[in-house]
Each structure stands twice: as C-alpha cells, then as structure tokens.
Image (cartoon, coloured by chain):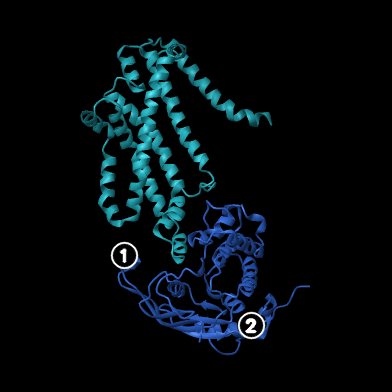
Chain colours: A blue, B cyan
Amino acid sequence: MAFGVIKNVRKVFAVEELGGRALEPVVALDDASFEFGEGDLVALLGPSGCGKTTLLRIVAGLIAKSAGSVTIGGREVTRPMGDYGFVFQAPSLMPWRSVLDNVLFPMEILKRNDAVARRHALELLDLVGLSGFLSARPHQLSGGMQQRVALCRALIHRPKLLLMDEPFGALDELTRMEMNDLLLRIRHETKASVLFVTHSISEAVYLSDKVIVFSKRPARVAKEIAVTIPYPRSQKVRFTPVFTAAERIASEALGVITPGAEEAPVQARAAQ
Amino acid sequence: MRSRFLAPLAYPLAGVVLIIAAWVLACWLANIPTVVLPTPDKVLRSLILRWELLLGESWITLKETLYGFLLALVIGLPLAVAVANSRALNLMFYPLLIALQSVPKVALAPMILVWLGTGLESKLAIVWLVAFFPIIVDTAAGLRATPKELLELATSLNASPLQVFLKVQLPAALPFVVTGAKVAITLAVIGAVIGEFVGSSEGLGFLLLSATSQLDTPLAFAALFALSALGIFAYALVGLGERMMSAWLPPVPARH
C-alpha cells in the first residue's frame, strides 16, 4: 500500500476564513487525488495561487479540508501530527536565536532538546555546509544560507514526511540549483518522503520521482508524470532527452505549450 | 582622523556655546530683568548653591516616574496579551482605550487628586495613565505582527498555547515592547510633573511652581535643567534595559 494517499480532497474557503476579503466562498481545491510511496520525492507543480499550497497545509494538518481524506503512513491526517517537517517560501527563522538554536527549536517544542538532538543538529548543519555559523544570527547569513538553516530545522526531529512550500522560489537561479542538489543529497541521507510545491517546471522534473501537475484554480490533478531518471542526478541530466520530454509533458499539461511539433528549428551555438 | 573623533563632540558643544552666548547677549542688550530671564551664570549659581534641594526633589520626581512606569509595564503587558489574543476583548476594550487616550491627562489630574490625595498614589496614577498607552498599543501590535509562518511552524509541531506564547509570540514582540517603553518613559516624566503641578508639596514640579511664585526665576531654571537631566537619565535606564536584552533583539531595527 502507498505511503501517502490523497483522495478526493476538496477545500472551500468560507467567507469568514478569508477575513472578509471575499464576497463568496472560494473553491481552492476541487477533488485532488494522488498517491506516493515511502521515500518518494513528489513535486506539486501548478500556476501561482492554484491551491497547491493549500493542499500542502491540509496534508500538514494546519487547515481542515472540506471533503476527502489524507492518509500518511496509515494514519488519517486531521490535525498536526508533530512528526512532519515544514519549509516555507521565506526562511522564517527567528531573528533572536542563533543558527543552532533555530535548528533546535522543534526539539524544544517536542521537549526532546537533549545532547542527542544537539549532535543531530550539528550533523545536519555540517551536511548543509554551515558548521562554521553555529552561533551566527540569521540576519548575518545570505538568503540561501538562511534557507539551508530552515531545511535543517525541518529535519531535526527526523520527520517521516518533509513538506516544502516553494522553498527556493525566492532564490536566484544558481543558488536554487545548488539548493536542489543539496535537497537531493539530504533526501538520500535521511530517506524522508518529500512533498515539494513549486511553479518551476524544470525544478519539479529535476528533483522528483513523480510530478503532479495541477490545473488553474480550483485545482484538480491535471497530470501525473513519472520521472524515470535514476538518482543520484546531476545538473547534466537537464540536457537529456528524457528530461526535456518530461518537461514537455508538464508544459503541455499546464497549457504553456500546445501538443505538436516545433514551429521553427532553433539553433544555439556557443560563441568561439 | 582627529576631526572624526572630535566632530561628534565638538559640534554639539559649539551649538550649546552658541545658544548660551545668544542668551547672555539677549539679557545684556535688552536689559532683561532676572525675574523674567536670568543670565546663565545666575542659573549656574542657583544650581550649585541649591544642589541639595534640587537633588532631593529630583529623587522624588524620579521615584514617581519610575514606579509609575513600572506599574504601566506590569499592568500594560498582560492587558496587551489579552487584547492581542482575543478578538472579543480587543473589540470590547480597544475603542475605550483610544477614547481614554484622547482625553488630556491634565484634565483628569484634578479628579485623580480628589480620589487619591496629594501623596505618591495620585502621581503614580497619573504617570501610569500617560505611560501605559504606548506600552499596550506597541506590545499588542508586536504580538499581532508575529510572522504567520512561525506560528504555523509551532502549530505543526503541536505546540501548546503557552509554548507558542513564550517561545514565539513574546520574543517576536520584544522589539515592539522596547519601542513602546521608550515612548512611555518620556511620557512618564511629563506625567509626574503634571501630578506635582496639580497638587503636591514636593518634587521638581512643585519646586518649579513655588520658585516662580516667589520670583526666584534662577531656581526655576535650575529645576528645569534638573528635570531635563532626569528625563535623560530615565530614558538611559530604559536604553540600558534594551542593551541587556540585546541578545534577544534583532540588531537591524528594520521592523519599524
């Protein structure tokens, strides 16, 4: 049986939930269903504001769904489980805490902030290349470094499932690629399952075992794409036919391109 | 290099000297009587000769200021927490708070005197009244400005309400509390003087009143200087508190 089963999930935001900003209820998710196996990295790909973030929050137990069911590891999710990691689009670190203390925050909440936790935090920070910044404050770090701290914070309690909400969306392209490789390495080490929300087609394909493409709001699953490129992957796979084929299917599912042959041959050549 | 070290000292000093020179010149040229505007040397004489009196009265005003300020903190902080966390309480009391703030405290002072007498209690009440508004408003704003993601992170870990408050909301609001406290302490000095003006037999405000009524203008000016020094000292105390908490505060004051 699959590790995660998302079945007919529907979310309608009532007017009150939207803080009086809307005049009528908003259907954010309309019947989303997919499954994933333990240790899978699944990308949720879709246009901005299509409800994929809402789905992620439902899986996290942060907001209630209107209909359907979410089962992770055999447990029905109705409230926060306490053993998922969450990474937001912004690093969202606590400016008053050091890097190490930021990473240990979940362990404090879970009342497991002991020597073992500390050792694990040091390992994680070493893994992301920040062992020299243990006592630094967040504002002293670059955006990419802050997001790496946030990643460590999400992993400190050894979550079975890592939920990531466009975590690298605010980073520049090169840093984003670096972070993608880092995530793949971390995922290989921790064996955690990952749900990764993004609106970058190439990021979705590069990272995941499976890409779930969402339609515009109200979101439905428009396409499931299995990415058969074996891990470990390197940035070179971006230039393989399998990669571009997957990108193409995703682009078609998103309606970015229409199915069919290229309209005109395009040539690019490196300058001498 | 020299000028870089001297400039921060030299310019303010030059400004003071210039003002004093203008003051002296005005007194001489216009032949202003001492009762109206004493020359700086007479004020200085008064400061030196009456230092014991001035220090004693300053101590009283300082006590009123600090006690009232602490009272505002002790009562304001929990109230801010209540208002920030409960929509009902917020709706019930926020408009009242604004209404109270728009009443000039000087207008309330005589009544407070009737209720609490001319002792320390009435001064504390007035100081509290002027000081607690910025504390409660800034603290409530800070508590409400807690980043949503941090709250979600805590929720996703099944944090208890107490944990959320102590580990997320309170530290996140601390820079706001400090800002409120800085405004509050300057208002507290004003509150103490108002209280002494309306009814008191001690303190710098009382000294100021009695000196002017006895046409001892140099002493009144000396009291003014003492009051200004007291204000700076009280503000510096809050600044010291801020420095002691600096480990908690983001060094970049980009949040305001």
Q: Quadrant of residue B204?
A: top left
Amino acid under disc 1 = Gly
Q: Residue at x 37, y 24 (%)?
A: B60
The circle on residue B196 is none
Residue B188 against residue A53 in the figure, above or below: above
> What residue appears at the point 46 percent right and 54 percent down from the top-left corner?
B167
Secondary structure beneath disc 2? helix
In terms of image quadrants, where is residue A237?
bottom right
State the image coordinates of residue B229 (x, y, percent, origin top left).
45, 25
The Cα–Cα distance between marks 2 and 1, rounded to whole angstroms, is 44 Å
Q: Label 2: which residue? A: A243
Residue under the point 63% across and 83% down: A244
Q: Position of residue B214 (x, y in %)?
A: 31, 11
Using a 10 Å C-alpha cutoff, classify the residue at mark 1 as few (fewer than 14 neighbours), some (14 to 19) or many (20 or more).
few
Quarter containing the N terminus of chain B: top right
Q: In this image, B2 relative to B146: left or right?
A: right
Disc tally is 2
Which residue position holds label 1? A20
Query: From this viewpoint, is residue B189 visible?
Result: no
The type of residue carrying mark 2 is: Phe
Query: Could you say where residue B178 lies in the image, as x and y percent from the top left?
Result: 45, 42
Q: Chain of mark 1?
A: A
